[in-house]
Amino acid sequence: MIGFCGGLTASVVILTLLLGAGSHALAPAALGEALWAHGVLGPWLRRSAAVALPVAEGALGAIGAIALLTGHQRVLQAVLVAGGALFGLYAAYTRHVLALGRGGPCGCSGRDLPLSRWVTRRATALAVLAITGALAVGAGPVRLSTPELVTLLLAAAACTALLWSLPAAMHEPTPVPVHPNRAPAHQQAETVHRTAEGGPTRWTSPPAL
């Protein structure tokens, strides 16, 4: 059996890899369009990366899941090292794109999520988790009790969901500029009525539809 720390970190990395591969499978054009928008890679590299990266995520996730369930420590360790290198590549690439002042979608899922420093931070955190998991898995077998195993699975699912949604949760939409000669919508919806005797202004809202 694999210890709690190794199992937790390995589960988070493997679930994230599978989520990434699944997202690319549901929206196969998203990654290629994102790489094109970034304008860093050449046409051949863009096409190759758009195909190779989802395949690598899916293969590593599937092999890692089998190794985790069957207790093959060496295979799991190799998967975590490779996953750490892949996430490290993501972190370096996104940091480079942002340093050049270029934007566009992140390409990490089917959602139209813009590239931001939180995408880089998530990839960095996953790379650290993968390397930590590889070290913990190689430290030696530890048998987990049933309650510990249930806790591990719940914690892994929660941590994966939090990391996966981090860029979207921290994204700050660009405010829509308001024309200086145009009042906000809620003020336009109100009508000013003054009484004939010159009384105070009375604000009335339009009747609800």
Image (tube, helix red, strand yellow):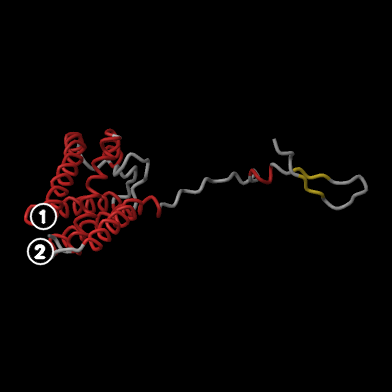
Q: Neighbour class for label 2 at 10 Å: few (<14), some, many (≥20)?
A: some
Asked whether 116 or 141 is in front, the reply is 141
Numbered disc total: 2
Residue 168, position as x, y percentages in the image = 38, 50
Name the side, left or right, on which 155 lies relative to 53.
right
Asked whether 127 or 44 is in front, the reply is 127
Task: Classify 74 as above or below 31.
Answer: below
Task: Classify 100 as above or below 45.
Answer: below
Name the side, left or right, on which 180 lies relative to 176.
right
Ranked by sequence position, the earlier of labels 1 and 2 is 1
Residue 169, position as x, y percentages in the image = 40, 53
Q: Residue at x 16, y 36 (%)?
A: 48
Residue receiving disc 2 = 141
Residue 135 location, quadrant: bottom left
Quarter that holds the N terminus: bottom left
**Badge 1 vs badge 2, beta-carbon distance below 8 Å:** yes
Q: Residue at x 21, y 53 (%)?
A: 13
Residue 165, position as x, y percentages in the image = 35, 51
Q: Label 2 amino acid?
A: Pro
Quarter that holds the C terminus: top right
Task: Classify 77 as above or below 49.
Answer: below
Q: Neighbour class for label 1 at 10 Å: few (<14), some, many (≥20)?
A: some
Residue 111, position as x, y percentages in the image = 36, 41
Residue 71: numbered disc: 1
Q: Residue at x 23, y 45 (%)?
A: 18
Asked whether 113 or 142 is in front, the reply is 142
Q: Label 1 amino acid?
A: Gly
Name the side, left or right, on which 185 lies relative to 94.
right
Q: Residue at x 68, y 46 (%)?
A: 187
